Image: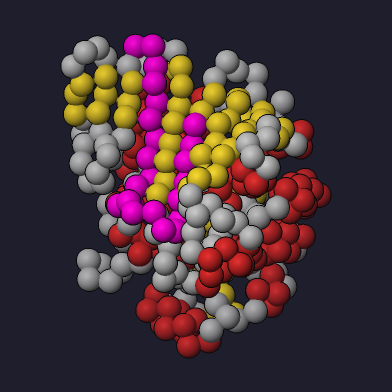
Amino acid sequence: MSMDKINVAIVGLGFGAEFIPIYQQHPHTNMYAICQRTESKLNEIGDAFGVEKRYTDIADLLNDPLVDAVHINSPIHLHAEHSIASLKAGKHTACTVPMATTVDECEAIIKAQQDSGKKYMMMETVVYSREFLYVRQLRDAGKLGKIQFLRAAHHQEMAGWPGYWEGLPPMYYATHVVSPCLAMAQADAEYVSCFGSGRIDENLIEKYGSPFAIETAHIKLHNSDLSAEVSRSLFNTARQYIESFDVYGSKMSYEWPLIEHTQPVVHTGEEPENVTVPDFAHLLPEEIQHFTTKGVYGEEEQHLSFIQGAGHGGSHPHLANEFIRSIVEDDDPFPNVKQSANWTCVGILAHESAMQGGKIIPLPAFTLSS
């Protein structure tokens, strides 16, 4: 690793391109290389952002000794394969959600991280959104009192997205609802029970064998008196996009608005109060603070992931900074590899539970922090 700058490589340049200028302007990083299977897309992005080192094959990128850290944004079914290869190549590794699509893959990533001694971080946007940071601030100041219950919902119509999304079990992509509940409670999931509801189009069922339009799970938290409820839909459900969480405390409760781009509500008694959630750019290095409120392409051309959900709540620079901070300070990132596995396995096992009529399924011990 360079004495001055960490050489970062980004794999996958759809959503991944959102992070290029963040790493270019971060004080501790050099945006060293990009990787994209389609050469024309690779060169288009490379030319647009002035990144000279370019790869069409991740294996070639991982063989480059100058690469220190890899940020993976490949399709879901490749997350585990690419993360394991990156860690085995001795690279610090960040990966977009979910960590993997099977419990065995999550365990293999943990082993690869432990064997390599390198950092692994699942880049979960919600726990760095301004909304989550605001409620965390309320929690840490004692304003919520004792947290009594947590709930989250993520409804998003995925028709027209790349083919690997078609018919995906809703809970396979559940980290956006699982993570705020577990992170706010500062606890791991111990076991889960989930029900499926409704039915998607027959042609969508074929790919994964999952019939459900909506999956709703209850999560029992480990070493805690708390439980959480999460729900998820991907197809054939009429609902405006929403990525939400609610936190109910003994002194104050926070509820996400039913309609996106309207104000959330806090309750301290009989009269609810609309609140304006502040930005938390001040927590970041000055050079990248401006990325909490805008995408990288300008107003006319933004990735759909940024348009929907208000730019992931300004989380992108926070995620990049946390990954780099963990390397610079030789500290665990948040979420670390076990937390990432716990959050991801909740969704995997929730779908398994739904297919078995709500059976209670424990989280594997290797995902528990203690």
In the rendered image, which quarter is residue 291 located in?
Answer: bottom left
x 30%, y 52%: residue:
240
x 46%, y 17%: residue:
148
* Magenta stretch in the rendered image: 229-251
Figure disc tally: 0
* Quadrant of the drawing holding the N terminus: bottom right
Is 120 displayed left or right of 232 in the figure?
A: right
The stretch drawn in magenta includes residue 238? yes
* Quadrant of the drawing holding the C terminus: top right
Question: Of residues 217 and 16, which is closer to you in this image?
Answer: 217
Question: Of residues 107 and 316, which is closer to you in this image?
Answer: 107
From the viewer's perspective, is residue 249 above or below residue 18? above
From the viewer's perspective, is residue 204 above or below residue 269? below
Is 121 displayed left or right of 250 in the figure?
A: right
x 53%, y 66%: residue:
202
The reply to whether residue 224 is visible in this rendering is: yes
x 49%, y 72%: residue:
162
The stretch drawn in magenta includes residue 243? yes
Residue 41 in the image, given as x and y percentages of width and height: 46, 83
The reply to whether residue 330 is visible in this rendering is: no
